[in-house]
Amino acid sequence: MTWRGRAAIGALRGIRARALRPVITRAGAVLVCAAALLGLPASTASWARTVAPASAPTVMILLDNNSSEGWLPIAQRAALAYLGALPPNVQAGLITFAGGWHLLLRPTTDRPRLEATVDAVQGAGGKFYNSMGVYSALAGVTSAVPGLDRLVVISDAENLVGHPAATVLTDVIADRLDSDDYVGRLTGLASVSGGVVVRPGGAAALAKASFGRPKKGDTSTTGPPRPPAKAPEAPSVSWSLVAGLAALFTAVLLIALTALGWVARIGRDRELAGRIGRYGPKHKTVAAEEEATDAGRVGRTAQHMARRLIPPTAEERLAERLDLAGIARKPAEWALLGGCLGIGIAAVLSLVTSYVLVGVLVGALLGWLTMRVTLSMRIARRRVAFGEQLPDMLQLIASALQSGFSLAQALDAVVREDAQPIAGEFSRALAEARLGGNLQDGLDAVATRMNSDDLHWTVMAMRIQEGVGGNLAEVLLTIAATIRERGYLRRQVRALSAEGRLSAYVLIALPLVVSAWLFIGSHGYMRPLYTTHLGELLLLIASVLVVVGTLWMRKIIRIEI
């Protein structure tokens, strides 16, 4: 193909690229708008379904857990009897009060969970020998749990002062155990609100009378008959939310890839222009400047925004780690890739779990961890490859020295072999030497960068040979043989310890996997671990033991050669 044909093809490619850029930009904008239009209504509808009041009857139990001796077991038995007599469709929740009040469980039809929560209630302890928290509980329950049909107060009115009142129909289950129990002051609470007062032994009968099916023509205790409760609808998949999240992810990914592609293209164009500029005029034409400006506007804007978000010290550390990993990207580009990955994970988690806040937080954390672990793995892999190439490199340098080359010429021959990563690292040492630095210092800096003790010892041998004299080629051949023997011994030890390492991994992962499985499959069985003080203590002890065991097994299976 002639140079005219190549020029025509290049011009066509440039025209096609310039034509596609606004199309891609507009497509990204359209996708973002579609995500907003589709995702927001779906999210609003999902939120409305979440906060919408349930159609089933709802009752909240206010359990007095004051420190009066002998009262709490009576209150727990009354609450359990009341719950046992409730129809299955009635939602019930639990609040405890003494000096203050605590919402333990919102209304639910999960009876085993309710009973377990009641069983786990402990006395208020300390100085709370009173039931004064009933005032704040009655005032706050209607705002904390809207849509209540009935309240049930279970209390002995220990040192109760005044006459509490409620805006919701309230029944009272009360008993007088000693002289400072003012049960009479709770009678007005029930009479004003339209409820009844019973003793703990009548809790089951109260539940049946309140929510059971009334007799024909009898409305003295149950009031007007309630409409039948609708069965809870099965959760449905919001396809508009799915489409919105998919469009948002596609738009962000497309824009990021386009920006990164333009940045890479600008770099290649500048490199090519620099090469051609050696044989042509020293100034750019106006058309070339306009094309470079138009192509790099989006890429430079994205990089500039990412660079403004990254602190200078963090940018320096990230640039150093990217250089160690052999990744030819700028810190801003790497941060943009991490942001796109985090957005994708957040979209998937938000779609799966239906919790946008959790999805965003976990997605950002997983995106950051993924990019960091990937970078660390690339650095470790590059250092391992450097260590494996080092014996062959030393043997090649020794052969060059025996052929009459100097040390710098031998290193230059190694660099020309272009065996990465060792060629790129040794080119640094040669560049420093050509700029007036010491060659051994440059090699020592390479050893520090690659975390190579073998190269440190090689540089030490070079310094000794430079001071006392001797045959450097034989020294390098001896070092290469020693490094090979150590590598063989290291691989043999790793193979022999593979069974122990696998056992350590299984023992470390086993308690975590089993705990996660039980939390998902048997939530009620694991609930006492984080609802009782003894369970929290046991959970803390187990976590400490897992950490100690992990460090211990890591020390055992790690053998230094």
Image (cartoon, rainbow, N blue to C red):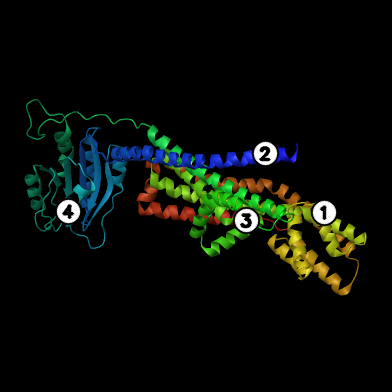
Residue at numbered disc 2: 8
Q: Amino acid at mark 2?
A: Ala
> Can residue 485 be seen from the camera position used here?
no
Q: Earlier in the sequence, mark 1 or mark 4?
A: 4
Of discs 3 and 4, which sits in the foreground? 3
Q: Secondary structure at mark 2?
A: helix
Q: Is residue 465 left or right of residue 330?
A: right
Residue kind at label 3, given as amino acid type: Leu
Number of other residues with Cα within 10 Å of mark 4, as a class: few under 14, some 14 to 19, many 20 or more: many
Observer-nearest residue: 531 or 339? 339
Residue furthest to the top in view is 216
Q: Which mark is residue 392?
A: 1
Between tags 2 and 3, which lies in front? 2
**Residue closest to the eye, 423 or 354:** 423
Q: Is residue 385 above or below residue 227?
A: below
| Disc 2 to disc 4, C-alpha distance | 87 Å
Task: Give how far across and how far down residue 52 sits, in percent.
Answer: 26, 39
Badge 3 is on which residue? Answer: 322
Residue 382: x percent and y percent?
Answer: 69, 53
Q: CA distance from mark 2 to mark 3?
A: 38 Å
